[in-house]
Image (cartoon, rainbow, N blue to C red):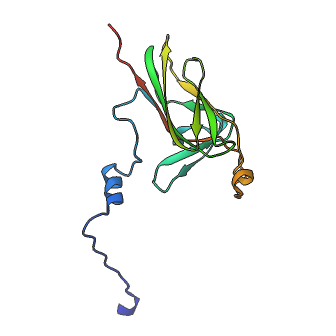
């Protein structure tokens, strides 16, 4: 019957710029690498047991994940051959425990840890390293002091956090002559 029928017709001339960009990426979040990386560590693929909180989706529709341990493990998605590589890390840090804090990264293959003084906000690290043997399951570690959003920012978030991972990936250098 006519009184029970309700419908609304919306007509769009086209998507706005944000929706158009999201559709162009097939609803996938933007990724910062330009070529096909050798291995990737996405926030949604990291494990709680390795020192990671739950995945979160930002207003920009980019998944991120807070580390909840002073040393968190980054698990990469595919094997690495021996040779020269560069580990890229894109992450965020809060102004706690200090406005500038060291973020330390140990690349796959138990190389030396490198530390970088990073201010609050989004940061990017590129760390070259060498592998003498292939790695079936590459892992890196990320070290940063814990801080509390409840104590530092007065929020209701009772977690203890370090940095927020946006993405990490590894590029392989072509073999030399």
Identity of the residue drawn at 34% across and 48% down: 25
Q: Is residue 162 visible?
A: yes
Left or right placement of residue 125 versus residue 163 in this view: left
Residue 143 vertical position relative to residue 155 in the rendered view, above or below: above
Left or right placement of residue 15 versus residue 38 in this view: left
Depth check, front residue: 18 or 138:
18
Residue 2 vertical position relative to residue 48 in the rendered view, above or below: below
Residue 118 lies, in percent from the top left, at 57, 36
Depth check, front residue: 136 or 98:
98
Q: Is residue 41 visible?
A: no
Identity of the residue drawn at 40% across and 89% down: 4
**Quadrant housing the C terminus:** top left
Depth check, front residue: 41 or 17:
17
**Quadrant housing the N terminus:** bottom left
Q: How many marks?
A: 0
Snapshot quadrant of residue 36: top left
Identity of the residue drawn at 71% across and 44% down: 147
Left or right placement of residue 155 versus residue 163 in this view: right
Residue 48 lies, in percent from the top left, at 64, 40
The residue at the far left in this view is 13
Snapshot quadrant of residue 20: bottom left
């Amino acid at each position: 019957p006519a009184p029970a029928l309700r419908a609304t017709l919306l007509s769009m001339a086209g998507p706005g710029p944000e929706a158009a960009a999201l559709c162009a990426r097939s609803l996938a979040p933007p990724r910062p690498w330009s070529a096909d990386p050798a291995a990737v560590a996405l926030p949604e693929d990291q494990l709680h047991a390795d020192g990671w909180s739950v995945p979160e989706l930002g207003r920009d529709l980019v998944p991120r994940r807070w580390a909840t341990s002073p040393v968190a493990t980054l698990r990469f998605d595919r094997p690495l051959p021996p040779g020269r590589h560069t580990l890229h890390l894109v992450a965020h840090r809060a102004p706690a425990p200090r406005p500038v804090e060291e973020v330390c990264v140990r690349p796959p293959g138990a190389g030396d840890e490198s530390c970088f003084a990073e201010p609050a906000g989004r940061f990017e690290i590129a760390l070259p390293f060498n592998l003498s043997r292939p790695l079936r399951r590459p892992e890196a570690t990320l070290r940063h002091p814990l801080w509390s959003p409840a104590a530092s920012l007065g929020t209701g978030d009772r977690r203890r956090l370090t940095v927020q991972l946006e993405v990490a990936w590894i590029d392989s250098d072509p073999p030399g002559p």
